Amino acid sequence: MADGGKRPQKKAAQQLVIPRSAAEEQRLKLERLMKNPEKQVPILEKPKDWAPRPPPEFVRDVMGSSAGAGSGEFHVYRHLRRREYMREEFMEKQAAQQRLEEEFQKKLDNNRREAEEKTDKRRKKRQKLKEKKLLAKKAKQDLTETAEGSDENSSSEEEENSPKEKVDDCEEPSFVMGGR
């Protein structure tokens, strides 16, 4: 032995771990994937749906109801009949699935339309409330401006006659109530 009698060491044998639950199995799979993050992960595509062969355009061996048919003819007939039943069943399932899809789309459209109607109604209500608040604010401002204008005329007379009095702001309403 040229390397001094030493044998090359093998990689440490991996321990056999048997997962005891689905979560542990998933954890082990993730750990194995994360050992080499650059490695491509195969993602399986959805398998194509089974579709029957279309019926033949030209039938060569037509079976009639005549007596004396061979013993093998029944098996041929049985096979053709089974294939035709499978084709009909497939078409019925496809029609039912299409009908369900159309109903689902109608329901989605109906829900979307109802949601839009509710949203529009609420939007209009918010807009009316906003306009009402603006009108109330303007009315309050006009009221205070006219009060200030009349107060200025009377206040100049009051200033001459009496000392200044503080006006209590907490007595004024913070909102305008709708009249009845």
Image (cartoon, rainbow, N blue to C red):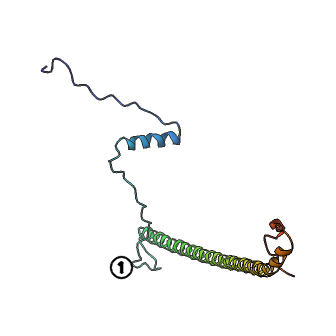
Which quadrant of the figure contains the C terminus?
A: bottom right
Q: Residue at x 75, y 80 (%)?
A: 145
107 sits to left or right of 175: left
Q: In the figure, 72 relative to 34: above or below? A: below
Residue 143 figure quarter: bottom right
Q: Position of residue 133 (x, y in %)?
A: 73, 76
Q: How many marks?
A: 1
The N terminus - image quarter = top left
Image-based side of 160 in relation to 33, left or right: right
- Residue 178 placement (x, y as % from top left): 82, 79
Q: Secondary structure at mark 1?
A: loop
Q: Is residue 129 left or right of residue 77?
A: right
Q: Is residue 51 above or below residue 151?
A: above
State the image quarter where residue 127 is shown: bottom right
Residue drawn at x 40%, y 56% is 44
Residue behind mark 1: 60
Q: Position of residue 40 (x, y in %)?
A: 33, 51
Most extreme residue toward the front is 160
Question: Which residue is located at x 43 percent, y 43 percent?
Answer: 30
Q: Nearer the viewer, residue 21 or 58?
A: 21
Residue 81 drawn above or below residue 11? below
